[in-house]
Amino acid sequence: MFKGNPAEKAGIKPGDIILKVDGEEVESSRDLTKRIAGIPVGKTTKIKVLRNGRKKTFTVTIAKRDDTALASSNRPARQEDALGLYISKLTPEIARRFNLEETEGVIILSVEPGSKASKAGLRPGDLIKEVNHQVIETVKDYREAIKKVESGKSVQLFIRRINAGFVVVKLTK
């Protein structure tokens, strides 16, 4: 998200999960981009987000993207950790979005392209159950477990993957 863009002006913050645009569910980041691109400049639209387990709706006025701001941004892409994962507490809303029956735990929301996690095959929707044999129940558990691993050392993730059961993924921090 860029400083001063329409989403920020409307009150949407980094980390918000966009659920709906004009009352229609957003299925993926690609779907979101397509929907926003299809809205004429100057039109206002309702965007429903999930923030810290609560749903909020914002009114956003669509504007033309400032490509110079995009090109000049030197901020790194949003990255949760050294592995390239952006994770969240699994809420009932996120569970529905990923068609999961479970409603508790830690879920991977996105994987930074080209990151260690991406190269290891981790995917959005994977539920993190253990890090190096330590049970993970909260985001705090995950962060503490990853923090304990020195750079260059192995990390073993025990995950539950949709339609694949349990999988062990090993990578280097």
Image: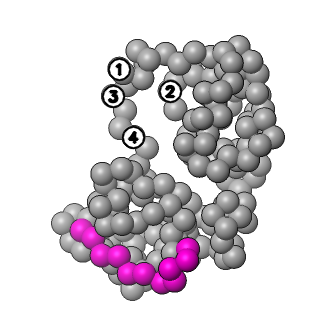
Q: Amino acid at mark 3?
A: Asn
Q: For this rendering, which residue is in front, 168 or 130? A: 168
Q: Amino acid at mark 1?
A: Ser
Residue located beneath label 1 in the image: 72
Marks 4/3: CA–CA distance: 9 Å
Q: Is residue 133 magenta?
A: no
Who comes first in sequence, dot 4 or dot 2? 2
Marks 1/4: CA–CA distance: 13 Å
Residue located beneath label 3 in the image: 74
Residue located beneath label 4 in the image: 77
Q: Viewed as shown, does residue 11 lie left or right of 22?
A: left
Who comes first in sequence, dot 1 or dot 2? 2
Marks 1/3: CA–CA distance: 6 Å
Q: Is residue 168 magenta?
A: yes
Marks 1/2: CA–CA distance: 11 Å
Q: Quadrant of residue 63?
A: top right
